[in-house]
Amino acid sequence: MAVAQLTREEVAHVARLARLELSEDELDTFTGQLADVLDHAADVEALEIDDVPPTAHPLPLVNVLREDVVMPSLDRVEVLAAAPHVEDGRFVVPRILGEAP
Amino acid sequence: MSTALEIAAAVRAGTTTARKVVEEHLAVASAREGELHACNLLMTDDALAAADAVDEAVARGDDPGPLAGVPIALKDNMCTRGVPTTCSSKILEGWTPPYNATVVDRLRAAGAIVIAKTNLDEFAMGSSTENSAFGPTRNPHDPSRVPGGSSGGSAAAVAAGYAPLALGSDTGGSIRQPAALCGVVGMKPTYGAVSRYGLIAFASSLDQIGPFATTVADAAALLEVIGGHDPLDTTSIAGPAPAVTAELGRGVEGLRVGVVQELSGEGIDPDVAARVGEASDALTAAGAKVEDASVPACTFGLSAYYLIAPAEASSNLARFDGVRYGLRVDGEDITEMYNRTRTAGFGAEVKRRIMLGTYALSAGYYDAYYGKALKVRTLIARDFAAAYEQFDVLISPTAPTTAFAFGAKTENPLSMYLSDVCTIPSNLAGHPAISGPFGTGDDGLPVGVQVLAPALGEPVMFRVAAAIEAAAPRSAS
């Protein structure tokens, strides 16, 4: 299966997914540069390795569990002090929904 | 300059003080920092206070630990409570973490003195430190050249004598490649051997913290302090740190050493290849049996890496959204705030990797790219396993070239990515690898030789690295 040539429109779509605003120049540059990297990756994309299992850790670790007991955690005041905007012990963000009609 | 082990012995014996040691190193850092820019922050006051605490412990008769009074520089992607941690990114400028990375707590418990947070390619993405939002670091051997990256600040700090030790992080070579380019020792442990808790994530299945030092013995001592199980990292390997110091004097008589053909030919500068040949001759002379080795799937390493690492980065860096920490650029609604914050906060290479990773993970492409790249990791691990049936360790160049000039690879990202071609396979397999200096190239700049070992093979790897170090030409610097 060959992956289709990367288009400028796809790059613009990916930028929206990634919450990045790219200028027209950046869109052109990134389209070429990302296409170069994907071209280089064509060797991997072409491999017939359906029966090979994936690897993410060199050792056969399984899920790590601990006793369900209360442990010390980060200091709430210290954590909130690092945030750009807080109120009443909470993070404040701009409005998420549009105005009611 | 003394080694870390010499300093610790003298401080513990009371023949010098931690304060004197720290003051001497801070003086070196102050003298050279204007030229080199190895650091984002020199922690002068904190370091002197910590040194005094070590000296008080010695005066009381307490043992301050195996790295008593030893100055160490930390790559600025490791969290230090109350001390700014930036990842050399505008998006984290001014942020002070509310907790310490596990390695930081272990260093302090061992008596080491953290003196600086070092510069890096933004979020550890790069091979030259040119991607730092705060300006590049310069190579102490030739300030017109890069120090390598992404841990270029840590490598330069050790090479210039700011500290005998530093920590870096290595996702595709980010400790070993700058160690090679700066003429110091740099080591990536087995994945899971050192806790990643408090290391700001780039590619979680590849990232490992590891030591920089001027000697193999110092790197071994540092690994023993930072390694070992940590319940706060779910990928942490059970058990203690690899015991490596005891291996250093054992020699290489009878060991089987393979020279990785796939990492030694095309694309490697001839002078670099010549030094690797001399290092393997030295191992033969020391009693090792050196032969050519083949790890065929290594040739897919770079492609697989540049699918996996950006994919994981695009997910990890989603947390930088202007809500809980770091930069916020306000907008009319939350989406506009996200967009403006991330657009203003991230540099070009970080955006490029986020874009690449988002694409590789997007609907319709996941199986073809990320899924397939994870299977390539299995192929590489299998080929390594086959090679390790015949060999105890493998060797290769660490980097294809010596330190290159600023700007030489910034226009073409793929050419920069090729700097990591020899180091990436170890990350994909999760194996340990170490780079030590071995002579210089035609330009007089340091060359690094890499020793690779199977998972948990640190003891034999350090043995071979020590033998290569013993045979290395003394550097002029």
Image: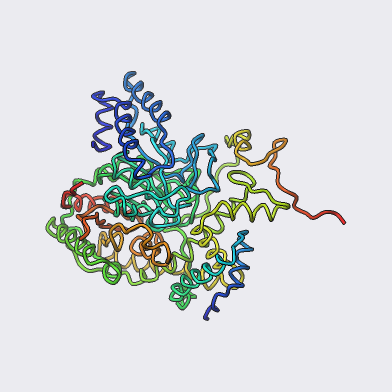
For the point 40% across and 28% down, which residue is it? Answer: B50
Furthest residue to the top?
B60
Query: Looking at the image, how many numbered discs can be counted on the residues?
Result: 0
Judge whether A49 appears above or below B55 on screen. Answer: below
Percent x, y of residue B172: 40, 58
**Left-right relation of B173 to B393:** right
> Residue A14 location, x and y as percent?
60, 66
Residue B136 appearing in the image: yes
Q: Position of residue B261 (x, y in %)?
A: 27, 69
| Quadrant in the picture for residue B42 | top left
Report the side of B201 relative to B391 (left or right): right
In percent of width and height, residue B44 lies at 40, 31
Q: Is residue B290 left or right of residue B104?
A: left
Q: How is the image coloured?
A: rainbow
In which quadrant of the rendered image does the C terminus of chain A lie? bottom right
- Quick check: B468 above or below B84? below
In the shown orientation, is residue B409 left or right of residue B325?
Answer: left
**Most extreme residue toward the right, as rendered?**
A101
In this view, A78 is above or below B392: above
Q: Is residue B66 visible?
A: no
The quarter of the picture where residue B217 lies is: top left
Residue situated in front as seen by the camera: B117 or B109? B117
Residue sitting farthest toward the left: B285
Up the image or down, B198 lies above or below B401; here it is above
Residue at (50% x, 51% y) in the render:
B201
